[in-house]
Structure formats: C-alpha cells, structure tokens
Amino acid sequence: MSQDPLSRTTPRAGPPAPGAGMPPPDAAGQARSDALLAHIQARIAVAGGWISFADYMQMALYEPGLGYYDARGNKFGAQGDFVTAPEISPLFAQALAAPVARAFGTLPAQVLEFGAGTGALAHDLLHDLERRGCPAEQYWIVEVSADLRARQQERLAAYPVRWLDHLPADFGGVVIANEVLDVLPVQLFVRGAADVQERGVAADGGALRFAGRAAGPDLCHSMSAIESAAGALPPGYGSELCPLADAWIAAIAACLRRGLVLLLDYGFPRHEYYHPQRAMGTLMCHYRQHAHAEPLWLPGLNDITAHVDFTAVAQSARAAGLDLLGYTSQAHFLMNCGILDRLVARHGSVPEAATTGALQRLLSEAEMGELVKVMALGRGLDEGGWGFDRGDRRHRL
Ligand SMILES: C[S@@+](CC[C@H](N)C(=O)[O-])C[C@H]1O[C@@H](n2cnc3c(N)ncnc32)[C@H](O)[C@@H]1O
C-alpha cells in the first residue's frame, strides 16, 4: 500500500539512524553535498575549529547554489523529502482566504508571503480571493531560495505577483508565513549541572562532529528566561532556541503600517516546548520521505527544522508593538475559517477518498491538526473574526 508523503517533523516510527533503509543520493547529489562539506570545513578552519550550530544550519540550508533550499531539486511532495499543508490540498488556502478576504475589507488588498515554496499557497489563495469577489491587487513574495523563486515565477506568471529582495519600507495588508519560522537557524544547548554548554560543529579529518563549549552571555540569559517559564531543566537536557525569530518578527513589525500577520508552524508554548520529557529537543531532518535526527549527515541534502517557541514569538511581537490577535491549533483555525463548508461546496457531502484523506491530514490531532499552530498578530485591527473565535489559546502562551 502506498503511504502519504511525510509531513515535516512526523517520523513514522521514531527517527532512524541516518542511512538506515534510506536511498543513497545520486552522483550529482553526493558531489553537491561533498562540495558543501568542503565549504563548511573551510569555514570551521577560519573560525578556529568551531562554528555554532546556527551557522552550520545557515550553510546547510541556504549556502548559495549548494544549501538544501537554494540548490535545485524536488523538496516538496511525494517525489521530494516532505509535504506541507498547501501541497496537501487547495482546501488549506481556500480556508486561509476567509481572514484574508475579511482583512481586505479594511486594509489595502495586498499580501506579503514569506517563503512561498512551490507557490502552491499563493496560487490557490489568489484563485480563491478572486472567487470571493475580493481579488488581491498585489501579492509580494520574499523568498531566500533562488531555485524556489524561479519555480514560483513559472507557476505564478499569470497572477499579480512580484518578488522582493528586501522588506518594503511601509506595508499595509496581510503577511503570511507557512512553515518558515521552523527553518530559521537555531542554536543548540545542553544543560549541565552548574553551567550551560552550546553545541556547535567541529571537523575531524573528513567528517563533521558536534562539539560543545561554554555558552556565552546571550545564551545564558535566554536559558534563564526559559527556566523561569518552564522550570529548572535537568542536567543533560538538550534543546534549541531561535534568536533569529526575534529579529525576523521585529523586521516585519518595522515595515507594517497596518495589517494582519498569520504565522503557521509546528510548535508549542514555551512550557510545553521545554518540557522535562522533551529532553532531546525538537530538531528533525527530512530526507527522501524519511525523518531522522542527524543534521550533520549529508549536508545540503536534508531539510533541517526545529519547532517554534510561540511564547517567544508572542513576546517578540509585543515588544515590537504588535497586537496578539489569536493563537490556536491548525485544526481549530481551519474549522473556524470554514474549511468544512468549502469541502461540501466543492466536493458535495460525500467527497472522494483522496479529498477526505487530505482533510484528515490537515485536521487530525495526530498530524498537522494539533502539531501545527496558527498565530495572528496585527496592527490597527479589531480583535475578533480572524479564525480564532473557537479554541483560542492565547492564555496558554
Ligand atoms: C518548509 S518551506 C515552506 C514552503 C511553503 N511556505 C509551504 O508551506 O509549502 C520553507 C520556505 O521558506 C523559505 N525561507 C526560509 N527562510 C526564509 C526567510 N528568512 N525569508 C523568506 N523565506 C525563507 C524557504 O526557501 C522555503 O521556501
């Protein structure tokens, strides 16, 4: 029986050792990974023998022409490494269109999407906004990957889409980012009995290995904030944190004159993220429909992700002057946005099995329905009606 493509961060039977039962890369893939490895080793040498994991992740995912997202290749869907919600069904974008259309009632009819992948969300969202009689006048995409940008340009040629190299100075409209925060580079830490170690990357002969060093003052400060929210972490506890997310939220806030920001990603509130039982953190890799936990294996050929600390995102947003308008699970959000009405309108009351299966993946508690959360931030907007009317969990952050 064929299986559905793997969503990110959902290993089917626990993360296996890398390589075990996984197809080897083809010659071109191996050569690209070898070239990236040489770059990383050179960088480690220049840095004196050690780089932070965030620096490693930045290179592994985004090194021009070699990193996972920047290099050519099929990352998404059954032929790729993992699948995302917009790739599962157009119903996802059709539901998301409800708060976007509502926002267009009071905001400029513009969308700014970060990290648009194959362009599936933009395509289906633009289509559904037209169907609702409130088309987007302009759709902007900020995409760091040259390869994905080219694919988006091909797919969205018929739509009013433009690509930006920098954030606009002054934006009014709706900002969307689906599964972008979880691919921002993270720092790794390990709690010691009396200190904190930062886990970075060193090189031994031809191979990369993890290496620890005493955490600097910023990491120690972040650890204190984590432990005051989640409780003291036991010695040996390892996890990650994402200081870049704070800068990313601040940059969005700085350019947003008036608007709605919808962030959808795998993640939890802080006290769940740094739960004593989650002692290995949330870092996860995806390679050809296999999930594993070894990010140093075949650099450039694996997606690397970490869940999002939504408490940290909410704090960053408030500090940057944005309002927190809602926080809930993907299932609650999509239901509040009328996904079941769209299902019946498009497919009748007895949809075919493939559509029911897709809906199940988007809404199921064991999959994206609960693991993915949706956060709405805003400036100059009313409180309600953005997809959080039932099941709002802001009080848990
Ligand atoms: C996991 S994919 C998600 C793609 C798409 N949003 C989806 O749901 O199918 C992550 C996307 O974010 C892009 N990306 C990563 N960091 C980014 C950043 N700082 N700004 C804009 N795009 C970014 C990647 O190149 C890729 O397109």
Image (tube, grey):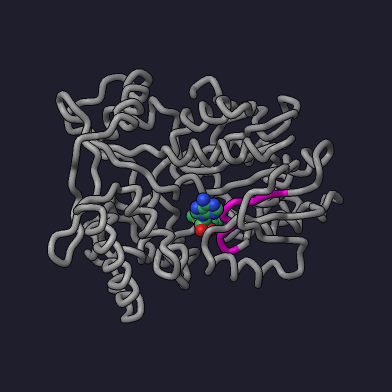
In the image, residue 288 above or below residue 129: below
Count the marks.
0
Tell me the residue at 27%/31% (across/down). 277
In the image, residue 330 above or below residue 354: above
Instruction: Report whether 146 appears left or right of 157.
Output: left
In the image, residue 308 above or below residue 312: below
- Nearest the eye: 98 or 303: 303
x and y percentages locating residue 229 in the rendered image: 38, 20
Q: Residue furthest right?
A: 133
Image quadrant in which you'd find residue 366: top left
- Nearest the eye: 260 or 319: 319
Tell me the residue at 37%/37% (across/down). 241
Instruction: Report whether 200 appears left or right of 61.
Output: left
- Nearest the eye: 332 or 328: 328
| Residue 275 falls within the magenta-colored stretch | no
Numbered range of the magenta stretch: 111-118
Asked whether the viewer can see residue 292, the reply is yes
Tell me the residue at 55%/37% (across/down). 249
Classify the position of the N terminus by image quarter: bottom left
x and y percentages locating residue 232 in the rendered image: 26, 20
x and y percentages locating residue 73 in the rendered image: 46, 72
In the image, residue 268 above or below residue 20: above
Q: Residue furthest bottom?
A: 27
